[in-house]
Image (cartoon, grey):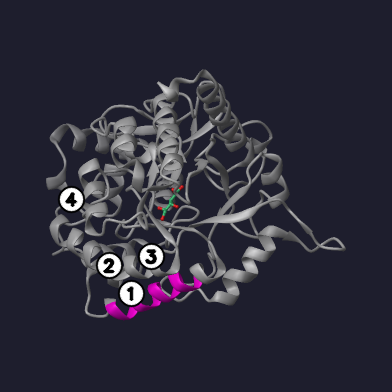
Amino acid sequence: MAMEQTWRWYGPTDPVTLADIRQAGATGIVTALHEVPIGEVWTEEAIAERKKHIEIDESVFPPKSRGLNWSVIESIPVHEDIKQGLPTRDKWIEKYKQSIRNVGKVGIPVLTYNWMPVVDWTRTNLEMELADGAKALQFDMSEYIAFDLYMLEREGAIKDYTPQQIEAAKRKFESMDAQKRYILEKNIIAGLPGGQEGYSIKEFKERLSAYKNIGPDAYRENLKYFLLQIVPVAIESGVRLAIHPDDPPVSLFGLPRVVSTETDLQFIINVVDSIYNGLCVCTGSLGVRPDNDLPGIITRLGEKINFLHLRSTQRDGDGSFHEAGHLQGNVDMYNVIVAVLKEQQKRSAANRIDIEIPMRADHGHTILDDLRKKTNPGYSALGLLRGQAELRGLELGIERSGVIFQ
Ligand code: DNO
C-alpha cells in the first residue's frame, strides 16, 4: 500500500498551479488559508470555498473534478499568547478550537501546526549554489551567529557561543557588504513562505524579549496546556493533529525549542494518547541532528504519524547544513520509507481509517527553467517534481522487493 502523494500549494497566487500539481502525480493538496490573520477563526464557509476551488474546476462547463482533494492543512499557526502562556491564551485557544471544529465539518482529515516560538523555519541563504548549478536552501551557522551578534546585537548573545564560533562569525560579518547583510537579515526575519510572520529588527527584539523568562520546561508546559484543551476537540471533530518539528531542531536566539528530539516527540504524544494527537515527521528537520535516528523514530512512534515531509539535509559541520537531494545527504531515505511502509502494513492489519499516510516531497532544489523564474524558496515546481518522482520510485522498488514483509 503506497503513501498518499501530496503537494504543498500556497493558494491561488502560487506560481505552481493546481493543474501543474496534478501532472506531478500528486492527488492530495496541502494548503492553508494564508489570508486569515494568526489566531483568528477559520470559518466553515471559507474552508469549504477553498476546498471547492481545489477539488472542482469551475472554469469549464459543466464544472469537472480536478482529481485532487484537500487532504492536509499546513498550517493553522498558533497565536503567540498561547505559546507564551499569557492570561489571554484561553481566548485564543477557544478560537483555535472553533477552527478545528470547522475543519472537521468540512471534512479535512489532517491539521499541521508547529510550536516554534517567534520564528518558523529558518535559513540564512536561499540560493546556495551546488556543484551542478542547482540552488539549495542553506543554514550557515557563522552567518546566523553574525546576524545574532552584529546585526541584531541581542543582549547576552555572546554567552551562547564559543570563542571559535565568535571569531568565525566576525570574519563572516566583515566579509559581507551592505547588500549581503540586508539579504541575510531578510532571509532570517522577514519570514519564509508559509512561515508565520515577518519582522523588522525592532519588532523582532520585542518578540524575543517576551521569552526572557520562558525556559524549555515552562515552554513545554504551555504546549501541554494547549494540547489538553485542543486534542479532545480534535477527537470530537475527526481531525488528526500533526505537530511539525523545529527547523532547525536547536535553540535559536536563546529561544526555547521543545519539538526537536525523539524525547520531545514522546512527551507530546504522551500528553493525550490518541491518534488525533499526532506528528508530522519532517525527515529534513529532525535529520539535522545526528542523534535523531529517523527510521527508529518512525518505527517507535509510527502509530502517531499523521503526515510526512520527506527531504534530506546535509550536515556541513558546526551546526551548518544545506538541503540535499531527496535521496542524498544524511537522511537514510531507503530505511525511512521501509519503516513507513511497515507502519502502514500494521495499520492495515488493525483496520485503521488512516492507512495511507500523506507524504510530500519537501524543499526541492531550484533547477532548470525555475532558475529563471520567480519561485517560492524551496517550493519551485521542477525541484519538487524531481524529489517526488525519486521518492515515488524508491517506494515502488521497496514495495515490489518484498522487503517490508520480512
Ligand atoms: C517549511 C515548512 C514549515 C511548516 C510549519 C508547520 O517548509 O515545513 O513552514 O509548514 O512549520 O507549521
Determine the residue positioned at 42% across, 62% down.
Answer: 197
Can you tell which quarter of the image residue 33 is in? bottom right
Q: Nearer the viewer, mark 2 or mark 4?
A: 2
**Tag 3 and tag 1, C-beta contact below 8 Å:** no
The residue carrying pointer 4 sits among few (fewer than 14), some (14 to 19) or many (20 or more) residues within 10 Å by Cα, namely some
- Classify the position of the C terminus by image quarter: top left
Which type of secondary structure does the marked residue at label 2 adopt? helix
- Provide the residue designation for mark 2: 226
Task: State the mark number for residue 173.
Answer: none
Per the model, the C-alpha gap separating discs 3 and 2 is 14 Å
Q: Which amino acid is tagged 3? A: Ile
Q: Which of marks 3 and 2 is nearer the N terminus?
A: 2
Instruction: Bin the neighbour count of mark 2 within 10 Å (Cα to Cα): few under 14, some 14-19, many 20 and up.
Output: some
**Amino acid residing under circle 2:** Phe
Residue 357 included in the magenta stretch of the image: no
Q: Which label's residue is closer to the chain start, 1 or 2? A: 1
In the image, 39 versus 106, the foreground residue is: 106
The residue at label 2 has a CB less than 8 Å from ligand 1:
no
Q: What element carries label 3?
A: helix
Determine which residue is flagged by label 3: 235
**Mark 1 closeness class: few <14, some 14–19, many ≥20 residues within 10 Å:** many
* The disc label shown at residue 157, or none: 4
**Distance from label 2 to label 4 (Cα)?**
30 Å
Examine the residues drawn in magenta and state their main secondary structure: helix
**Residue bounds of the magenta highlight:** 90-102
- Indicate the amino acid at tag 1: Ile
Report the amino acid beneath label 4: Ala
Residue under label 1: 93
The mark lying in front, picked from 4 and 3, is 3
Quadrant location of residue 222?
A: bottom left
Real-space CA distance between mark 4 and mark 3, rounded to the nearest whole angstrom: 42 Å
Residue extending farthest to the top is 401
